[in-house]
Amino acid sequence: MKKIEAVIRPEKLEKVSEALLDKGHHAMTVTEVRGRGAQRGIALQFRGKEILVDLIPKVKIEIVTEDKNVDDIVDIIKTYAHTGKNGDGKIFVYDIEKCLTVRDE
């Protein structure tokens, strides 16, 4: 099994989520996060002054799945989260040693 973590733009979450659902990948955990990467933050104007916001709001999607689904899920995320600009996000894939369901004791 693998765990896929994707950090993407918040405005792309709905499209990514719908595309995953359409392909039968329904289980996910979504968390609002803040971070920075190559874009190093953004400059905003507030009352005539420039303010540097160095931690940008993002969304983290976490999916645990069978190995055979990884490439499909990664392709969906890359396709639907892409804008071509800095700040599109990152995708990480981890090995999962064990996955237990709490309900099953």
Image (cartoon, grey):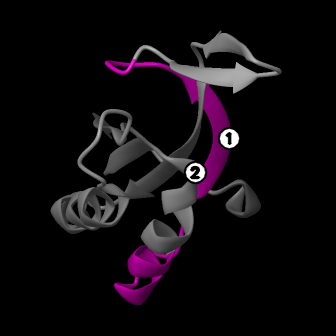
Disc 2 from disc 1: Cα separation: 8 Å
In the visual, does 85 lie left or right of 101? left
Q: Which of 21 and 14 is in front in this view?
A: 14
Q: Position of residue 19 (x, y in %)?
A: 40, 79
Q: Mark 1 highlights which residue?
A: 32
Residue bounds of the magenta highlight: 18-39
- Asked if the stretch drawn in magenta spans residue 24, the answer is yes
Examine the image and state in which quarter residue 58 appears: top right
Q: Residue at x 37, y 46 (%)?
A: 4
Membership of 60 in magenta stretch: no
- The quadrant holding residue 89 is top left
State whether residue 27 is above or below residue 85.
below
Relative to 4, say whether 13 is above or below.
below
Where residue 22 sits: x, y (%)? 40, 88
- Decide which of 66, 42 is in the foreground and name it: 42
Q: How crowded is mark 1: few (under 14 residues within 10 Å), some or many (20 or more)?
A: few
Q: Residue at x 50, y 18 (%)?
A: 41
The circle drawn on residue 10 is: 2
Q: Which residue is drawn at 47% across and 19% down?
A: 36
Of the 4 image quadrants, the one containing the C terminus is bottom right
Mark 2 lies on a secondary structure that is helix
Q: Quadrant of residue 95?
A: top left
Going by the numbered disc 2, the residue's amino acid type is Pro
